[in-house]
Image (cartoon, rainbow, N blue to C red):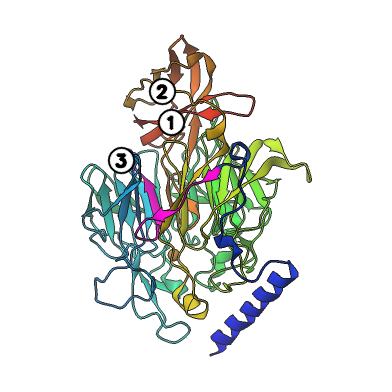
Amino acid sequence: VEAREAGDVLKLVAVVVGVLSGLPAVGPWMSAGPAADVADEGRWLAPFDGEVPAVNMVLMHDGSVLYWSGVDDHDGATVPFFVDSPHPAHARVVDFAGPVAVVRTPTPHDGGAGDMFCAGQTVLADGSVLVVGGTEYVPLVPFTDGWHVYGLNSARRFDPATDAFATQQPMVGWRWYPTALTLPDGSALVASGIADLPYPQTHVTFQERFDPATRTWSVLPPGADNLLPLYPRLFVVPSGPLKGDVYYAPVGCLWCPFGAHPAEALWNLDQSLDLQANAWTIHGPALLGARQHGTAVPLLLQPPAYDMTLLTAGGTLNRMVFATNTAELASLAGATPVHAFAAPMTHARWHHNSVLLPTGEVLAVGGGMLDNVVAYSAENPPVLEAEVFDPAGTDPLTGLPGRWTELAPMQVPRMYHSTALLLPDGRVLVGGHVPLPFIQALIPQVTEERLEVFEPPYLFRGPRPIIADAPADVAYGAAFAVGTPDAASIASAVLMRPGAVTHAYDNEQRGIVLTMEGRSSDALSLRAPPDGDVAPPGYYMLFLLRETPEGPVPSEARFVRLA
Ligand SMILES: [Cu+2]
């Protein structure tokens, strides 16, 4: 009862904030916005039925997208999530190869090994998708002694060639909200997750690794142990003294396990794991501390140094219920990460998604201004306007590096459990949004099953360059030729790793500019990135970019396998 009253107070706060800021109290965000200039603002296509909420989304190397919500009936339990879902909420694949998007159901439809709701995922070097952990349900009665969410040790591998999941050896750890990450050697690291929410002593502090050759798990030595937040934002450092290390950006899901563990103070600090020494180094703090459900995106890696700069943006600071619009750039080129303020976003938002584009810009979509976990209300408008960050720009108001430009508004609110990733045709697929069930009980709202596609402004800058021919396989450091009738006008070529995203974090997101060593009238000579630290092995989208007065225009991508 106390908790319900606390929720009412927060709702009241939400109403007051909504009124004070002049925001309308009902949902005008459901109507389409005014006609926009597509060359300036891009364009959202009509939402279409994806059949299940896309809580996790993964782009596969055939161009289709695997997504799922989880929610199974393995143990016959009644699942209070997705109370308004007309479909069995399991995995789907959406295929964009034809004139219309086609949604189909893979085999088995639930992944075959435990519920995939709030699992982690990564794409292995062979193009299969590893899905780890998830949710074991017990009756979810909030704020009583019976409140538990159990993590799973399940592992499954989805092969796009067979359209099927295969159950793998289970992990050692039982993990709800884990992060999976493909490493330079092609193995997959799994970190964090909790075995029994809300009990912080069950937070999994050891890391384990999936060997794709033997398809077995091994726990890293105790020196690699660390209590990280749930869904910690982890990235492989491509260069410099930390080359090959796994970097923890101070962003993640910080509300669990409810501030009960002293090590949580360290979540505000940059940390890096040396995979050879199996030891963590704790670096300095992020300028504003850890971001709760904010985003962290590595900007394009540029040859010859391939140094990584991470853009972190949004989320909430200090576990406040209000989102921030602040952003930081963290340079990972040296022995210690260096943070600097970046231009703030036009909109404060959290639970949004940030998508690295082949132009080097970062697209921010969705999210909300107010915590919709603890304080969602009808008076809490989601942020519908997309915006894009140009790292080469300067903020006219603050003089800070980078520049955000507001783009067209999406039609569907997307907050908690929403997702977005870059498609090989240069568009951006957006899906998901699943509020918590006890929040739904307070304020009826939609478990969102529609998918939505955004066409960025770069698709309206004239003809796109064409890739006539590209190799299917490229070796690290090798020279290779790409045929194009537009060779004379190509300004750059980039490899974009296919996205794997959930909970506002795309662990696979990474783009590498290729060295251009020569060109003829109909071909470019390119040089592949040097090693797996710069570009972990696997499939990449190769884009060519043509420069125009309005900005670069990307080609459609060809998939290239890097090994
Ligand atoms: Cu979740």
Give, as a three-letter code, the residue at label 1.
Glu
Q: Which residue is drawn at 54% across and 53% down?
A: 410
| Residue sitting nearer the eye, 543 or 272 | 543
Q: Name the residue under label 3.
A: 127
Whole-percent x, y for residue 128 in the image: 29, 44
Quadrant hosting residue 84: bottom left
Whole-percent x, y for residue 542 in the image: 42, 29
Give, as a three-letter code, the residue at label 3.
Gly
Dot 3 falls on a residue whose secondary structure is: loop
Query: Secondary structure of the magenta portion, mostly?
Result: loop
Dot 2 falls on a residue whose secondary structure is: loop
The answer to whether mark 1 and mark 2 are in CB contact below 8 A is: yes
Dot 3, crowdedness within 10 Å: few (<14), some or many (≥20)?
A: many
Q: Which of marks 1 and 2 is nearer the N terminus?
A: 2
Disc nearest the viewer among 2 and 3: 2
Q: Which residue is drawn at 75% across and 70% down?
A: 20
How many numbered marks, from 0 up? 3
Q: Which of marks 3 and 1 is nearer the N terminus?
A: 3
Q: Mark 2 points at which residue?
A: 467
Q: Which residue is drawn at 58% across and 61% down?
A: 29
Q: Which residue is drawn at 39% across and 20% down?
A: 478
Quadrant observed for ligand 1 in the rendered image: bottom left
Q: Mark 1 points at which residue?
A: 556
